[in-house]
C-alpha cells in the first residue's frame, strides 16, 4: 500500500485509476509504469505477483514498465514523468531504509 500511496500522491491520481480504469489522461500510464517498475526492479516482485495487485495482462505490464524505462529527460512531458518516477523511487527506498532502522 505504501508504494501505491507514494505514487498516487506524486502523480496526483488514485489507485483505482491505475488498477482498473483505462482512460488516457497522461498520468495513469506513467503512474502505472512507475508502480510496476518499482515493484519489479526495487522490490523484486515477479510479474505474477504484480498481476495480483494490478490486474493487467503480462504484455500490458511489460508495455507500461518499458514506457517508464525509456523516458527521455529532453522531452518536456517525459521529463516531468521521469522526475516523478525518480522521486517515487527515492521515497520508497527511504521508507524501506528508515523502516529497517526502526524510525518508521
Image: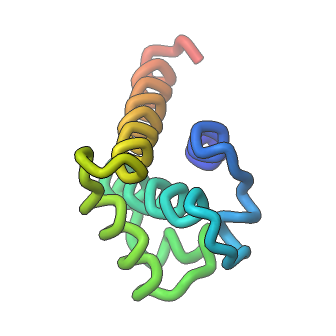
How many marks overall?
0
Provide residue 94's location: percent of width, then percent of height.
Answer: 42, 24
Q: Nearer the viewer, residue 85 or 50?
A: 85
Give the image quarter of residue 41. bottom left
Determine the residue positioned at 46% across, 38% down: 88
In the image, residue 86 above or below residue 48: above
Of the 4 image quadrants, the one containing the C terminus is top right
Determine the residue positioned at 39% across, 30% down: 90
Q: Nearer the viewer, residue 23 or 39?
A: 23
Q: Nearer the viewer, residue 26 or 31?
A: 26
Provide residue 37's location: percent of width, then percent of height.
Answer: 38, 58
In the image, residue 39 above or below residue 99: below
Provide residue 8's location: percent of width, then percent of height.
Answer: 65, 46
Determine the residue positioned at 31% across, 69% down: 66
| Relative to 16, 68 lies left or right | left
| Relative to 7, 64 lies left or right | left
In the image, residue 52 above or below residue 41: below
| Relative to 37, 71 lies left or right | left
Provide residue 52's location: percent of width, then percent of height.
Answer: 60, 74
Amino acid at each position: 500500500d505504501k508504494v501505491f500511496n507514494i505514487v498516487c500522491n506524486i502523480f496526483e491520481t488514485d489507485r483505482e485509476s491505475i488498477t482498473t480504469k483505462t482512460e488516457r489522461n497522461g498520468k495513469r500510464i506513467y503512474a502505472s509504469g512507475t508502480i510496476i517498475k518499482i515493484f519489479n526492479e526495487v522490490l523484486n516482485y515477479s510479474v505474477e505477483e504484480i498481476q495480483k495487485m494490478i490486474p493487467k495482462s503480462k504484455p500490458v505490464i511489460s508495455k507500461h514498465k518499458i514506457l517508464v524505462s525509456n523516458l527521455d529527460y529532453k522531452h518536456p512531458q517525459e521529463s516531468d514523468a521521469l522526475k516523478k518516477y525518480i522521486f517515487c523511487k527515492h521515497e520508497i527506498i527511504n521508507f524501506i531504509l528508515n523502516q529497517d532502522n526502526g524510525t518508521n
